[in-house]
Image: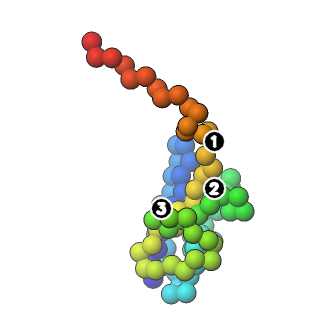
């Protein structure tokens, strides 16, 4: 079956479509995709993964067409960051 694996960093992103077996899990798809070699900074022991925006465990089974996502850690708390002022119309 065909699934996708995606990851994004500032200035660089990857969305890879791969073929996996019918018993594939999220972690096997990530390993087979080669994305870990493309982005050495990925640390699956600390970063979360998901399928279509829903966080899943690495052993989550996949279905045809699923998109496996590797999430980067949040570097700031959105509740504490002030909103940027929009420029006023002249």
Residue 59, above or below 8: below
* Mark carried by residue 19: none
Instruction: Determine the residue positioned at 68% across, 62% down.
Output: 44
Q: In whole angstroms, how far apart are the C-alphas of marks 3 and 1?
A: 19 Å
Let me know if residue 21 appears in the view.
Answer: yes
The residue lying toward the viewer, choosing from 71 and 35, is 71
Estimate the x, y position of residue 86 in percent, counting from the top left.
38, 23
In-front residue for pair 79/5:
79
Q: Quadrant of residue 42?
A: bottom right
State the CA–CA distance, disc 2 to disc 3: 20 Å
Badge 2 marks a residue whose secondary structure is: loop
- The answer to whether mark 3 and mark 1 are in CB contact below 8 A is no
Find residue 5 and report its horizontal and vertical position in percent: 51, 66
Q: Residue furthest left?
A: 90
- SS class, disc 3: loop
Report whether 30 appears left or right of 64. right
Rounded to the nearest angstrom, the CA distance separating label 1 from label 2 is 18 Å
Q: x%, y% of residue 4?
A: 47, 69
The mark that comes first in sequence, 3 or 1, is 3
Mark 2, Cα crowd under 10 Å, few <14 / some 14-19 / many 20+, is: some
What is the number of callouts on the image?
3
- In the displayed image of the protein, which residue is found farthest to the bottom? 22
Q: Residue at x 68, y 53 (%)?
A: 41
Residue corresponding to mark 1: 75
Q: What residue sits right under mark 3 in the picture?
A: 53
* Residue 58 picture location, percent across and down: 63, 72
Q: Residues within 10 Å of mark 3 (few under 14, many from 20)?
A: few
Kindly identify which residue carries mark 2.
39
Q: Earlier in the sequence, mark 1 or mark 2?
A: 2
């Amino acid at each position: 079956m065909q699934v996708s694996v995606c990851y994004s960093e500032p200035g660089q992103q990857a969305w890879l479509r791969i073929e996996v077996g019918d018993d594939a899990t999220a972690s096997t798809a990530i390993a087979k995709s080669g994305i870990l070699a493309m982005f050495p900074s990925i640390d699956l022991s600390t970063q979360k993964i998901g399928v279509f925006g829903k966080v899943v465990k690495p052993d989550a089974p996949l279905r045809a067409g699923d998109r496996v996502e590797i999430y980067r850690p949040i570097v700031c708390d959105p509740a504490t960051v002030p909103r940027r002022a929009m420029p006023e119309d002249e």
